[in-house]
Amino acid sequence: MNPIQVGLLGIGTVGSGTFSVLKRNQAEIRRRAGRGIEITMVADLDLDRARTLVGPEVKVVNDARAVIANPDIDIVVELIGGYGIARQLVMEAIAAGKHVVTANKALLAVHGTEIFAAAHAKGVMVAFEAAVAGGIPIIKALREGLTANSIQWIAGIINGTTNFILSEMRAKGLDFASVLKEAQRLGYAEADPTFDIEGVDAAHKATIMSAIAFGIPVQFDKAYVEGITALSAQDIRYAEQLGYRIKLLGITKRSIDHKTGAVRGIELRVHPSLVPMKRLIANVEGAMNAVMVHGDAVGTTLYYGKGAGAEPTASAVIADLVDITRLHTADAAQRVPHLAFQPDAMSDLPVLPMSEIITSYYLRLRVADEAGVLAGVTGILAEAGISIDAMLQREADEVGAPDGDAQVAQTDLIILTHDTLEGTMNEVMARMQALPSVLQPIKRIRKEELA
Ligand code: HSE
């Protein structure tokens, strides 16, 4: 049988990785797919660079639409990124009856509903293993390997840049800004790192996993997104003293009312979280990714690997190419649905607003070191029915000389709580903040036991 023909839109880092891995492993890939897979056309604005990368046998053009219009191309691989032209090209490729492979998490998290509906109507596949956690086959695991399970929760380190920064902050005791600068110098963080450090990239990926895990539409606009820019080395140290590491987690969870057993809705959130040091995921360092998935039958599982880079991401892109090669002649109804659940069997469970989520907390209060302060703070927690899990108070001289008024010694009071409603915690924090003995804005970091 003739090889299946693939057209690449964009040949940057991932595109060139895909080209070289496909070439290097072509014999084995053909044995697995049952048919050769060849990149025969590439569109890129930098024609000279593209030609140098792929050699004379591959047609190189600067017009992506020429790839989509080529009747010999069966699969279009979109590696342009972003929501703009990439969205138009993906929709045009689908309309032209092409299968699509994309690594574009932003596009799918925001426009996935429209894209999957168009693909379903046209009977083509849109495959996106590379969009979440790079080389880790987490989409395959969630959609197929764990299909027997009612998924309870997912928690992942799904942004390598921020995990690298947090690892460095902890190891070197440095603050965020200086580590970011160093990460940029070393090429671990982009010149404009906003999407990574503000948690947006992780939220795109968490949104996609949430849809697949719970059979809900992709709803990036409902995700709570908080990055790592406000984290201090001091909080990392205090967390460590209490047996925790701070990680930027993408979390999605089926929220259960423990009194009635009813499902309240779906939590979808990205924020720094304290994680017990004894969990494997707490020890995932540097730019590596890891995703924990808890299913009712399987229990807790953990997937670890490189979340970015040319060949790890190519590994996921090519896995999709092989899947499509195997399945493209199959009856469309027999294929694995894009979001794991059949399109007519999606759930309308709501994504909960942040005030409705339930989690536990790390609170750091800068307080006057005088009688009655602790009682005032813990009294507010007790009145709200919030149970304290652990406490740490630094001696005043351990946290340096008192700021400002030399007559009043100050200290840091760190409180870990048990689970509570975020809305209740917001009210409690406002009451604590109003105490005259609380001298600075209270620092709140959420905590996940991941048991
Ligand atoms: N910028 C991402 C990261 C990789 O730092 O993990 C691509 O999603």
Image (cartoon, rainbow, N blue to C red):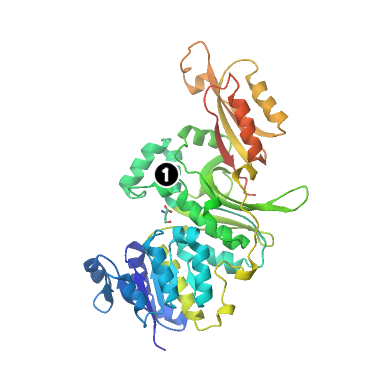
Q: Name the residue nearer the viewer: 175 or 43.
A: 43
Q: x and y percent of residue 64 in the render?
A: 32, 70
In the structure shown, which secondary structural element does the residue marked by tag 1 occupy? helix
> Residue at the location (48% across, 61% down)?
111
Image quarter where the N terminus lies is: bottom left
> Residue at the location (50% across, 43% down)?
226
Q: Is residue 322 left or right of residue 52?
A: right
Whether 104 is drawn above or below 231: the answer is below
Q: x and y percent of residue 120 in the render?
A: 53, 73
Whether 435 is drawn above or below 350: the answer is above
Q: Name the residue nearer the viewer: 329 or 146.
A: 329
Tell me which image quadrant ligand 1 sits in: bottom left
Q: Is residue 350 left or right of residue 67?
A: right
- Report the residue that reaches farthest toward the bottom: 1
> Identity of the amino acid at label 1?
Ile
Disc 1 marks which residue? Answer: 165
Q: Is residue 101 left or right of residue 390?
A: left
Q: Is residue 397 left or right of residue 430?
A: left
